[in-house]
Image (cartoon, rainbow, N blue to C red):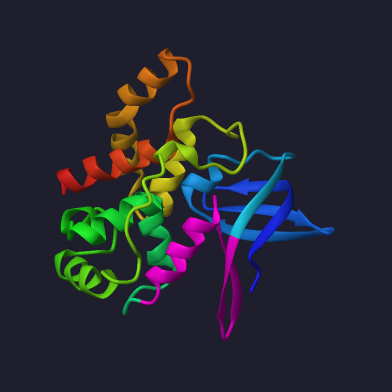
Amino acid sequence: MIAFVSGPVAALAPDSAVVEVGGVGMVVQCTPDTLSGLRVGQEARIATSLVVREDSLTLYGFPDDDARQIFELLQTASGVGPRLAQAMLAVHAPDALRRAVSTGDEKALTAVPGIGKKGAQRLLLELKDRLGEPLGAPAGARGVGSAVTSSWRDQLHAALIGLGYATREADEAVDAVAPQAEAATAEGTAPPVPQLLRAALQTLNRSR
């Protein structure tokens, strides 16, 4: 088990980061929330979960140990693999998932690409006693690094494409949440990419 990787960020992609660890570049599959806090050349510590398959070893990365734990717990439900678990964390913060499961919020789970109504109902039943109660941590309290590497538009667009949406759909969703990003900029803060991604996914689900 590789619990975390720590070192300078060597490269970033829409769905992964390369972290130099002891002279070796480790590729880590990351959620948008994780990537939004990383910068090339900057030191980072990423909580990780190693998924072993017959033909591959894949590291999945998260902003903190709590997100990693939720990622692993989600996979104890039937039909949930690492990709779907990561998509769930791309849409919802760990506490939001705990809250959704503890309150039986089916709509919150169907906001995740790949989860339909029946799948959400099954997940609510299977995960009810596994995720625990919400911790109450502020949504903005998490983070891995500091400055983002590209504009919020680029990051958001790349995240949506990575989740399987067409370019046209991603363009429309980015435009739909632009007022929220502009409002944050006007207040002197960086646009919150994870929150914008959740809002963008909601607009896409409403339009389908």
Position in image of residue 140 (x %, y %): 44, 36
Asked whether residue 112 is in view, the answer is no
Q: Residue at x 52, y 53 (%)?
A: 15
**Of residues 69 and 147, which is closer to you in this image?**
69
Depicted 201 relative to depicted 175: above or below: below
Compare residues 106 and 52 and report the one nearer the observer: 106
Whole-percent x, y for residue 47 in the image: 60, 57
Magenta-colored span: 48-76
Report how many numbered discs are placed on residues in the image. 0
Q: Against 129, is 110 above or below?
A: above
Quarter occupied by residue 149: top right
Q: Is residue 102 shown above or below 200?
A: below
Q: Is residue 62 magenta?
A: yes
- Apparent side of residue 126 relative to residue 20 in the rendered image (left or right): left
Answer whether residue 161 is magenta in the image: no
Left or right: 180 with respect to 162?
Answer: left
Q: Position of residue 78 (x, y in %)?
A: 31, 80
Work out which residue is located at the far right of the displayed protein and give it.
Answer: 23
Camera-nearest residue between 89 and 176:
89
- Please say if 112 is above or below 34: below
Residue 41 can be seen, yes or no: yes
- Whether residue 102 sits left or right of residue 48 in the image: it is left
**Residue placed at 51% from the left, 29% from the top?**
151
* Image location of residue 43, percent across then percent down: 73, 43
Q: Which corner quadrant holds the N terminus?
A: bottom right
Residue at image point 44% right, 18% down = 185
Q: Quadrant of residue 202?
A: top left
Residue at point 19% right, 64% down? 116
Camera-nearest residue between 167 and 175: 175
Furthest residue in direction bottom, as rendered: 54
